[in-house]
Amino acid sequence: MTTSIGSRRPWSDVAGFAASWARRNTWTIGLFGLLIVFLAITKLIQPNYGAPGIQGLAISILPIAFAAVAQAIVVIAGGIDLSVGPMMALASVTSAVLMKGQDDLFGVWVVIGVLLLGLLVGAINGGLVVITKVPDIVVTLAMSFVWAGTALLILNTPGGGAAPWIMAIISGPVGNPWVPKALIVLGVIVAIVWLPLRRSTLGLSFYAIGSHRLAAFRSGIAVGPTKIAAYALTGFFSALGGLALTATGGVGAPVPGSYTLQSVAAIVLGGVSLAGGRGGVLGPIIAVMVLALVRTDLFFIGVDPNWSTAVQGAILIGVVMFGSLVAMRKVRA
Amino acid sequence: MTTSLATRPAESRLRRIVRDQPLIPLVILFVGLVALLEFAKPGIVSGNWVATTVRSAIPLAILAACQTLAMLTGGIDLSVGAVASMAAFLMATLATGQGPVVAILIAFAAATIAGLVTGIGIGVFKVHPLIMTLGMSLVILGLMSVYQLLMVREGTLIPDQIQWLGSGISFGFVPNNLVVFVPVALLIVVGLRRSGYGRLLFAIGDNPIAARLAGTRIWQVHVALYILSAVLAAVAGILIAGVNNTATVSLVEQSVLPSVAAAVIGGTSILGGRGGYAGTIVGALILTVVTTLLTVLEMPEAVRQVLFGVIIVAVAAAYTRVTGET
């Protein structure tokens, strides 16, 4: 990857680079500020909120964080995948059924196999979108039935088991009690897969076909294969989310829950434009944390947990309305 | 796809039929499915079968009406499940204390407010319909969960009239919910074709910029659309409560995706500007018959879901292929 855009940037100008990064990522920085504000609020409400709380938070957000990354990639490439939740369920039950009662080495092979399965399942979604030319939302909506049904065929009720190492890998801290393993796992995996990709031709092509399909096509990008690759990657991260579900729960979960909808909410809050071509994966991950903290705070101040769903929806709507108001102001000015 | 010149005329005629009269192939598909069902279990198709099929297709068809209207403008309404459940649950909890009429009125009022908020979000604040309706369904679900805890002592009651309307069958083959459905369907089918408002929906979906330049106040159309959609969802929710003789805060949630599927199968484009309600009704009937067929064949729920998804993709792909729309 010697021809990537990144290597041509004058790295000596670190300050200038930081400034331009900050300009391009205002939304993410704002979100990060919001995250810190909420952490401070949490500490104020519950003075003994500390390292264990942070660890619990990191573990609980792991599946949904992977789902958000998965959704972000496909939306950046101009699509949307409503089958993220069912794909997670499929990965979760497959891993749980295969891992139950097996030794650790076999567990490693299971993880690799499930990730490949995720790539395949995602590629099928993408292939159908490209070949049938049916709108993404319809295809993935229909495929969400298919994957949910397949997951139920594999495992009808929650069951199976997780290899002990996969559970150990995400629980507890690394060195300092303030650094939860789950967060490191999330960061490392996302960094290994997404950062090089983003700088590669393929990653740039995702942004290109997402922001202007025709222009991308005329610049010589193979739009179809690129889109399939984006969907495959979404399947890959959904599979990671499914593995995280198995690891956090210890069993396979055949019913996907509301992960699809939560992933869409997270990417919108995270600054990924639903129109495609804009955003990254860091914003959605921070958005997931903020949403989780809001729920924690509501719990701490004694609000009925049932309110948290309503508050989450209101935040989603409110933030998006705010965003579009800002955009409208800009257009007028 | 090597199309020789000789096959061209026949193919283009097929194309024209599917594009202009999507009802014809849909009805053929429907009849074929019914024939398949009769073949799979001889004697199942009877007056009573027709009544139960129509009865269970009607709430789905009303929910799919919400999707059809929203999809014509290029939107989608994922809040129908939450709004319908809310209406059903409000009616069921208030019926004991307030009486059925007041309970139903309150249910409709709540749905109207929900639709108004959705419409303002989409029309005025230009929030993407997918996000707005998704957010609204979270808000409604959360509020209803809180409300459920407040009303836990009240218990639920489905008024007798609603039970009669939702689940009753007259003369052995006429489901009573046709009383509600026939006027609703006529209003939508005729309204889409003949009224100015119906044409505005098509216009906005086809080309929003052209519609705006032609003087359409798009935000008003959107607000009216989503209020209408919420009221229709409330009707469906109350009917479903009548069928099941119970109401919970997530009663209708599982019908949201099938309602989108029914509209898609019925030939309404999710991109906007093309479609109609007659096709959607047949789409809802097709989905209901497919469900029965898979039950008769003793397929487990999981296989049913898989086939459901495959059918939707196949039908949608056939549409795009034949009409040549991208």
Image: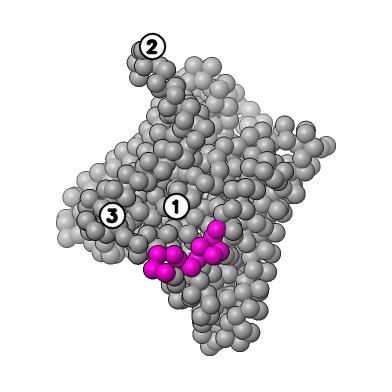
Residue density around tag 2, few if under 14, some if 14–19, many if 20 or more, within 10 Å: few
Where residue A233 appears, x then y in whole percent? 40, 38
- Chain under callout 3: B
- Mark 3 lies on a secondary structure that is helix
Which mark identifies residue B294? 3
Part of the protein shown in magenta: B171-182
Where residue A140 appears, x then y in whole percent? 43, 43
Q: Do the residues at pointers 2 and 1 share their chain? A: yes
Residue drawn at (83%, 37%) of the image: A333
Where residue A112 appears, x then y in whole percent? 26, 44
- Disc 2 target residue: B5
Which amino acid, mark 1?
Answer: Ala
Q: Earlier in the sequence, mark 2 or mark 1?
A: 2
Whether residue A141 is situated above or below residue B248 in the rendered picture: above
Is residue A326 within the magenta segment? no
Residue drawn at (53%, 88%) of the image: B153
- Disc 1 target residue: B284
Question: Gap in Å between the C-alphas at discs 2 and 1?
Answer: 37 Å
Q: Residue furthest right?
A: A333
Question: Gap in Å between the C-alphas at discs 1 and 3?
Answer: 15 Å
